[in-house]
Amino acid sequence: MQILNTRRHFLKTSAAIAAATTLPQWFLDESSHAATKPLGPNDRPGVALIGCGGRGRGVAREAAALGQMLAVCDVDETNLAQATKTWPDAKPYADFRKLLERDDIHLIINGTPDHWHTLVNLAALKAGKDIYSEKPLTLTIDEGKRLVKAVRESKRILQTGSQQRSDKNFRLACELVRNGRLGKLKHINVWLPHGRREGPFDKMPVPAGLNWDMWQGQTPAADYMKEKTHVTFRYFYEYSGGTMTDWGAHHNDIALWGAGFERSGPVRVEGKSLVAMIPGGFSAASEYELTYTYPNGVTQLIRSTRGNDWKGSVLDKTLQQHGVRFEGADGWVFVTRGRIEASHPDLLTTPLPANATRLYASDNHMQNFFNSLGSRQQPICDVEIGHRSASACHLGVIAVRLGRPLNWNPVAEEFIDDKEANTWLAREMRQPWSYSMV
Ligand SMILES: NC(=O)c1ccc[n+]([C@@H]2O[C@H](COP(=O)([O-])OP(=O)(O)OC[C@H]3O[C@@H](n4cnc5c(N)ncnc54)[C@H](O)[C@@H]3O)[C@@H](O)[C@H]2O)c1
């Protein structure tokens, strides 16, 4: 009897162990999305905005027209109040983790500064939310690798906010290149607006209503300076990469699209800063020049231009404007916001043949994201595209900071035989703000 009991107990226990170690996939899938109510065919998705600055609110307005704005979140009460004024029915939150617990929120708009994009996005995926995330998608290449994996595993939709992909001019330029209209592609010129070179800045008391510790998140603890936060954070290496990542996430993205390396990248990167930055001031290179080489020998020159200010508005028409120029053996095409030009007019006016390679077509970036929510098909700027475009920019920032040429393996996503450069793939994260928090 005693033996029987023990054996029965053993069988029960071993069955329990087997079940616990081999949970069926359907159960795992279901549990990972347990925090979100399924969306019926006629339901408007529940939307939440995390990061209520100028861009977040702008993009959220587009999403609010297609879904229901249910929640807004910011670590700064002033910007949070602006958002609640726009959407009085949306519930305000100071911590995105609390907001993500809600089961009626289907998607988030991530309008936080660059150093918060990935941790917020990873937490949202865990809570079963779809994501429209502002560009540059990541702060480091390591973040991007993890994010791509997490999106794929969770089967969520992520649209990167590089909205130039949903602009006809940019698509046309890339289709002309891809279809050999310029002859063999030889070279790409990318001009980015120059950044800001100012400082030193004074430290100041933290304004009432701003959670400065949480604003800084994973970045090194620093004294508060007003230039470090809203909008101008992007000129500090600590939080971003200057215009190389800010505008690079747009124009380098188009260069990769046209050249056909949007899911890969260059194999060699070298470059330099053209001015010394002011100690105690903005820390990301404001003027720079870089050369990239792609696996097929195509080269790309990336230069900052003083023809535009850091917001992209035209400063001096006599100087080169920001944009992308693809140069082939038989001609060139230049594209920027609101303008496309070519070496010969017929390059643009002659229609592409019926059997031409056509690229993913979207004329409205937010609508394209909402279409993907229903179809579960990839949006135009899916996570890998966002990651690779940001990576291309991070490679440039690293090359400038290291001050020497770098050889890159775009398949392994590592520098080749270069231990020092590989330490730049990730940055040290200030605890407790790290991958383990999400
Ligand atoms: N696609 C585009 O054309 C475009 C244009 C402008 C900005 N952007 C991108 O949008 C992002 C935001 O830019 P911005 O100019 O609106 O900056 P911003 O500084 O005005 O806004 C960012 C907001 O996020 C808040 N925030 C910071 N940490 C947070 C956290 N942990 N949780 C919740 N809120 C937090 C800040 O307090 C601030 O209100 C940047 O990544 C930028 O590159 C994209």
Image (tube, rainbow, N blue to C red):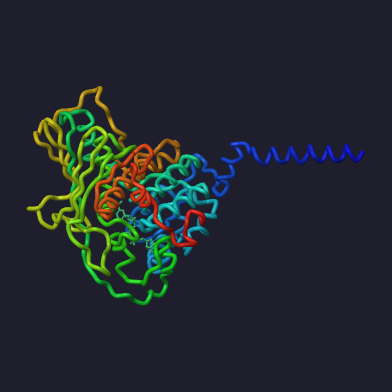
Q: Is residue 176 visible?
A: yes
Q: Position of residue 342 (x, y in %)?
A: 12, 37
Q: Is residue 91 visible?
A: no
Q: Work out which residue is located at the far bottom of the displayed protein and give it.
A: 205
- Reply above or below: 280 against 303: below
Q: Nearer the viewer, residue 295 or 24?
A: 295
Q: Position of residue 144 (x, y in %)?
A: 40, 47
User: Quick check: 401 left or right of 426?
Assistant: left
Q: Position of residue 64 (x, y in %)?
A: 40, 52
- Reply above or below: 180 against 290: above
At 29% across and 36% down in the image, what residue appears?
261
The part of the image, by quadrant, that contains residue 176 is top left
- Reply above or below: 208 against 418: below
Number of numbered tags placed on the structure image? 0
Q: Work out which residue is located at the far left of the displayed protein and give it.
A: 318
Quarter of the image where the N terminus is located: top right
Q: Nearer the viewer, residue 56 or 134?
A: 134
User: Quick check: 433 left or right of 200?
Assistant: right
Q: Quadrant of ligand 1?
A: bottom left
User: Quick check: 422 left or right of 40?
Assistant: left
User: Quick check: 276 left or right of 36?
Assistant: left
At 20% across and 27% down in the image, what residue appears?
352
Q: Nearer the viewer, residue 367 or 263?
A: 263
At 39% across and 55% down in the image, what residue appears?
427
Q: Work out which residue is located at the far right of the displayed protein and give it.
A: 1
Q: Position of residue 219 (x, y in %)?
A: 40, 62
